[in-house]
Structure formats: C-alpha cells, structure tokens
C-alpha cells in the first residue's frame, strides 16, 4: 500500500472509533451525537489538523448516498401498527407543513435580511425537513405517547422527499426554462406519487423474493434487503420520481414483512445507518470553513427564530386541522421538529449549482443546526413535562439490536424438536429447566404462542428460551438430556454431558 493510503486509513479508523465512543458520551450529556460528529469534522479540517476539503459536488453525492441508508433504516424500523394511525397527520406535515414552513421562513428572511425572493425561499426549503437522527437521539430517552413518537418518526422519514424536490426546483429557477406554477405543482405530485408507487413495488418484490429464497448464508439477507431499498431509490430516480420517498416506502414494507432472519436484518441496517451518519456528519464538518462562520451567526439566529417560533408552529397547526390534535400535542410537535444533517446536505445543492448567495446559505444553515439543536435537545424533556404529554407508564422501547440481553446478562437460545427426539410429547414444566431459564415462545406450524406449563411439545416445534448467563450451560445440558432420554432422563443417568471426549 502507498503511504498516503495508510495515513488515510489510520485517520479514518481513528475518527470512526472516536465517533463510536462519542455516542455514549453524547447520550450521557443529552446532546445528539450529530454535533459531536460535526465537531470531529471541523477539528480534522482546515482549522484543526489542516486537511483542506472543498469538493461540494462530492459532498452532495456522498450525502445523498448516506441519506438513502438512513431513510431506509428509518423505514425498516418503523412499525406499521403504530405508523398507520398517524399516517394522515404525518403526510400532512410532510407536504402541507413543508410548504407552509417554506413560505413563512421565506417571507421573514426576505423582509429582515433583505434577500431576494428566490434565495429567501431557498432558506425555507433547505430548513423545511426535520431530521430523524437528531429527533430520535433525544426522543428515545423520553417516555411519550406512541402517537407523538410515531408522528415525529413518520414525518422525519417522509418529509425529506418533498424538501429535496423543492430545493432542486428553487435552485434551478432561472437556469432552466420557467414553467407555470400549476405545471410545477403537477410535477411535484407526479414525483411523490410515482415515488410511493415505486417504493411499494420494490417492497413487494423484495418480500416475495426473500420469503422464497434459500440463500446459503443468513448474512446475505440483510444485504439483499438493503439492495432492494437502494433499487427503489434508483428506479424512482430513473423515472424522475422521488427516490427518497421510494426508499422509505420500500423500507416500511420490508420491515413489516415476516422475512427470514428479520432481527439480523434490522441489526445490520441499524449499524449501517450509524456508519452513514458518522461519515456524513464528519464530511459536512470537514466541508465548512470556520473562518466564515462568524458572519453567519446573525442570519442563522434570525432564521432559526423564525423557523422555531413562527414557521414550525404554523405548519403544525395547519397540518393538524383535520385531525383534532390536542393543543398541547401540537406545541410539543412544534418544539420537537429538530433539524440535523439533512438541511446541511440540502444546502449543498444550491452550492453545487452555484446559486448566488449559496455559500452564505450553507454557513447559516450549519450554524443554525448547531445552535438550535443544542437549544431544543436540552429542553425537550422539560417541555414534555410542562405540556403534560409524557407517559410515565408507557413501556420504553426494547430492541434486540441494542443488546438489552447483554445488559441483563442473559442469552437467547433457539431449539428445534426434530423427528426422533424424545422432546416430543414432553410438557414444558417437565423440561425442569434450571432456575434463571424459561421457554418464552413456541412456534408451531407457522404460528407463535406463549406456552403454559402444560403445553406438550411436538415434532417440528421451535422453542425460544431466555436463560441467565450463569444458567446457560446447565440449560443446554438439560435440554440435551431430555432430547436423548425424555422426561425421565435423570433416572436413566443422563445429564446431557458431552460424551464425545
């Protein structure tokens, strides 16, 4: 390898490991990790280690690639049972709310900062999308009603698509031949509708293929699922539709399908999304020039206040009109609309197209994201309590990929009852598992159920067993013994010991 490549790998690995460690640090402080990643990018940039990077086009391309992965993971982890009741409200926030936010921010920026209408509306369009990574880095620590959490989750996954389309439209205004306003509205409707249809097609195709595929390794299933979401983006873009909406819809369909190795798929997507976020935020921090940020503070504060105090509450109020949303919930939805990496990525679009004033727009958006993420993230918990929208009795979300079993020092065991096994015909209580182990689920003929003590095992059953770490070995020995000699294994001197040695 060349010395340059070795150095790049060294720096890249060091930044990645620091970023992974920063997740725990940021969680303790209650600060979204994106700010730590942005800071890492700035520190290794021209003002820190002296690495100069100014390739806006490369940043935009890599940023879009990262967003594909992040949005795909958001769709895969979204549960349809909680998403369905809020789909109407989330769709309104992602369309009507986005338009209202753009108009309000555009008017304020035009009047107070004296920018021309095109650039002022670009400020609004770039900032119209909420950020899933920023929102849920904070919300996951709070106990909130499922309706609020699902609404914010769905909105953050869906509003990227119209925001990207409107930023592209405004960035190209005056460069390409102008069209009547009704044409642009129809074009926007086509892109969103076709994008959703492409996402449905890719999701259904992926579900059909993966259910019937007999891949030689379980590790291939997560790769295939990610492949189908990327396929959705590419197919949508080829049809001049919204690729981001296609990705999210495909992810929701695949994530809510009974796919083989589903937990491995979700774990892989979660890790890949973390990697995409780290790379994206560090790259954006590397792109910014700290020497220019002083001049961007005042425009950022003015724009941020307009967004936080006017645009976001008004967009929520207008979007919520048909859905009878409580005023307290509307206020919390307004305050919880965090901005993150997405607006910074969107700001690279006019920058790469050389729109006049785009460099100041990028700097202002960067400063705004840092300032207002700190402000809002630290006040979400008090705001939820003050508005009375907390749900103390609500169970916190438990995901296998976040390793709660490891924190509880427990293991998850799966056992099949094959033909010829003496486990067949044994009742669950006759397994006499050691203290600290229990059969939690039985899958029989494709139907899962929680067994009782008198449940009789049958050939073909699959058992899911949770065992404390200290009881795992004894549990495995007992199951082997019963499998060989039945419920009276100990009477026959069978203790499940390894007899091959």
Image (spheres, helix red, strand yellow):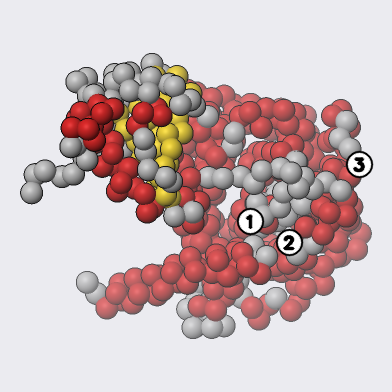
Q: Is residue 363 left or right of residue 199?
A: right
Residue bearing mark 3: 327
Given residues 29 and 34, the one toward you in this image is 29
Do the numbered discs 2 and 3 sit on residues whose CB atoms are within 8 Å? Answer: no
Residue 16's image quarter?
Answer: bottom left
Do the numbered discs 3 and 1 sit on residues whose CB atoms are within 8 Å? Answer: no
Q: Classify mark 2: helix, strand or loop.
A: helix
Please state the horizontal and vertical placement of residue 65, each as a whole percent of the image: 49, 50
Report how far apart the C-alphas of labels 3 and 1 lie in the structure: 25 Å
Q: Classify mark 1: helix, strand or loop.
A: helix
Please state the horizontal and vertical placement of residue 461, each as a whole percent of the image: 34, 22
Q: Residue at x 48, y 45 (%)?
A: 400
Given residues 300 and 358, the one toward you in this image is 300
Residue 108 vs 238, above or below: the answer is below
Q: Residue at x 67, y 66 (%)?
A: 31
Query: Residue 297: which disc?
Result: none
Q: Residue furthest left?
A: 501
Residue 17's image quarter?
Answer: bottom left
Quadrant location of the N terminus?
bottom left
Please state the horizontal and vertical placement of residue 188, each as a whole percent of the image: 69, 33
Report how far apart the C-alphas of labels 2 and 3 lie in the structure: 21 Å
Residue bearing mark 2: 377
Which callout, 3 or 1, points at the residue further toward the start of the chain? 1
Q: Is residue 200 left or right of residue 412?
A: right
Please state the horizontal and vertical placement of residue 73, each as a whole percent of the image: 52, 43
Residue 211 vs 53, above or below: the answer is above
Q: Residues within 10 Å of mark 2 (few under 14, many from 20)?
A: many
Q: Residue at x 31, y 18 (%)?
A: 425
Q: Classify mark 3: helix, strand or loop.
A: helix
Residue 445 vs 256, above or below: the answer is above
Residue bearing mark 1: 137
């Amino acid at each position: 390898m060349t010395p340059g490549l070795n150095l790049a790998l060294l720096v890249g690995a060091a930044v990645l490991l620091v970023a992974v460690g920063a997740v725990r640090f940021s969680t303790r402080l209650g600060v979204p990790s994106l700010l730590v990643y942005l800071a890492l990018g700035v520190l290794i940039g021209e003002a820190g280690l002296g690495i100069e990077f100014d390739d806006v086009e490369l940043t935009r391309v890599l940023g879009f690639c990262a967003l594909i992965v992040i949005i795909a993971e958001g769709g895969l982890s979204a549960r349809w049972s909680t998403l369905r009741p809020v789909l109407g409200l989330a769709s309104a926030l992602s369309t009507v709310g986005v338009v209202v936010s753009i108009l309000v921010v555009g008017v304020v920026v035009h009047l107070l900062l004296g920018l021309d209408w095109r650039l002022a509306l670009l400020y609004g369009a770039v900032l119209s999308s909420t950020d899933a990574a920023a929102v849920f880095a904070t919300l996951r620590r709070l106990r909130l009603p499922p309706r609020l959490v699902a609404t914010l989750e769905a909105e953050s996954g869906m509003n990227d698509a119209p925001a990207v389309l409107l930023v592209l439209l405004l960035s190209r205004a005056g460069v390409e031949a102008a069209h009547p306003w009704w044409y642009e509205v129809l074009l926007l409707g086509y892109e969103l509708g076709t994008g959703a249809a492409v996402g449905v097609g890719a999701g259904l195709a992926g579900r059909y293929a993966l259910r019937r595929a007999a891949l030689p390794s379980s590790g291939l299933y997560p790769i295939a699922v990610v492949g189908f979401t990327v396929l959705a983006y590419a197919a949508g873009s080829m049809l001049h539709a919204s690729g981001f909406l296609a990705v999210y819809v495909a992810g929701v369909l695949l994530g809510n399908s009974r796919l083989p190795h589903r937990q491995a798929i979700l774990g892989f997507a979660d890790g890949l999304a973390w990697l995409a976020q780290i790379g994206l935020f560090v790259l954006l921090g590397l792109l910014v020039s700290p020497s220019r940020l002083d001049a961007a503070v005042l425009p950022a504060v003015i724009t941020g206040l307009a967004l936080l105090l006017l645009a976001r509450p008004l967009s929520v109020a207008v979007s919520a009109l048909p859905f009878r949303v409580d005023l307290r919930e509307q206020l919390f939805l307004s305050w919880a609309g965090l901005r993150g990496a997405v607006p910074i990525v969107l700001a690279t679009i006019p920058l790469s197209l050389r729109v006049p004033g785009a460099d100041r727009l990028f700097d202002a958006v960067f400063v705004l994201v840092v300032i207002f993420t700190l402000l809002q993230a630290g006040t979400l918990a008090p705001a939820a309590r003050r508005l009375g929208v907390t749900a103390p009795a609500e169970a916190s979300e438990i995901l296998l990929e976040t390793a709660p079993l490891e924190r509880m020092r427990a293991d998850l065991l799966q056992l099949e009852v094959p033909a010829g096994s003496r486990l067949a015909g044994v009742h669950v209580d006759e397994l006499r598992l050691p203290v600290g182990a229990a059969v939690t689920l039985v899958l029989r003929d494709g139907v899962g159920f929680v067994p009782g003590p008198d449940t009789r095992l049958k050939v073909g059953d699959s058992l899911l067993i949770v065992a404390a770490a200290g009881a795992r070995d004894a549990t495995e020995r007992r199951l082997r013994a019963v499998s060989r000699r039945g419920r009276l294994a100990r009477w026959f001197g069978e203790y499940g010991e390894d007899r091959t040695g």
